[in-house]
Image (cartoon, helix red, strand yellow):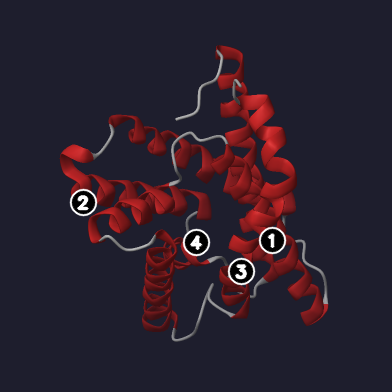
Amino acid sequence: MKKSTPIQFIFRILIYCLGMFILATGVAFSVNGNLGVSPVNSFPFVVSQILGVQLGTCVTVFFCFLILLQIIILRREFRPINLLQIVFSTIFGYFVDFAKMLLGDFCFPTYFGQLAMVAISIVFIGLGVMLFMQTDLVPMPMEGLIACVAKKTNKPFPKMKSILDSSVVVIAVILSLVWFRSLLGVREGTIITAILAGRLVGVFKKPLGPIVDKICFSK
């Protein structure tokens, strides 16, 4: 792990939280666009519609379940510091609800307006993920689960990410079809986000990564 002074460590936490808030804002835009949410949020979105509770609450519970899976898979290899994922998952859930409250029911009119909402969502997601990953703190639960499964199976991270993301979407689709007899939360926007969001992380990292490193880490 990279070294940082106490002040720099505080900045790391602040930038990590900023990244989560930007990511949560991206989730809110995707929900309002009504063309499908990002893969990792598709399952909690469907559950929130079934139970009639806030999306942020379902995201937090789902992320805690992913942390439990990490513990079961890694057992003694699970690092206690990664329990901080629970804290950050709770904060992220609150950010999702707060961002949704700020955005209200706002959405651009027409189908092209909905696509614009998806585009904005992808930009926020890419930027948010880049920021919290660049701080080199604890991973978000989905990324943590993908990493430990990749480690145990000796499979590359990108391949396991595709498999686990797809699995979450499939479960969300099945649950939606069984409960509502229609698709909720999984549409063309989900596919577009899955294809483009990861690439935008790299786009943002090139100019912003060195700036974050300069703020957060000692030479």
Q: How far apart are marks 4 and 2 (CA)?
A: 22 Å
| Foreground of the two, 52 or 192 | 192
Callout 3: helix, strand or loop?
helix
Residue at screen point 24% across, 61% down = 153
Which residue, as the protein is rendered here, is positioned at the far bottom?
A: 181
Q: Nearer the viewer, mark 2 or mark 1?
A: 2
Q: How crowded is mark 4: few (under 14 residues within 10 Å), some or many (20 or more)?
A: many
Find residue 200 and report its horizontal and vertical position in percent: 67, 59
Q: How far apart are marks 2 and 1 (CA)?
A: 32 Å
Residue 121 marker: 1
Q: Distance between the residues labelled 3 and 4?
A: 11 Å
| Foreground of the two, 144 or 212 | 212
Looking at the picture, does residue 9 appear above or below residue 157? Answer: above
Residue at screen point 57% across, 73% down = 190
Find residue 207 and report its horizontal and vertical position in percent: 75, 45
Say what amino acid the circle numbered 3 marks: Thr
Find residue 2 and report its horizontal and vertical position in percent: 50, 28
Q: In the picture, which quadrant includes the C terminus?
A: top right
Q: Which of marks 1 and 3 is in front?
A: 3
Q: In this view, does 179 lie to the left or right of 134?
A: left
Q: How crowded is mark 1: few (under 14 residues within 10 Å), some or many (20 or more)?
A: many
Total residue callouts: 4
In this figure, which residue is indicated by the disc labeled 4? 41
Q: How far apart are marks 3 and 2 (CA)?
A: 28 Å
Mark positioned earlier in the residue sequence (3 or 4):
4
Callout 1: helix, strand or loop?
helix
Mark positioned earlier in the residue sequence (4 or 2):
4
Say what amino acid the circle numbered 1 marks: Ser
In which quadrant of the rendered view does residue 43 lie? bottom left
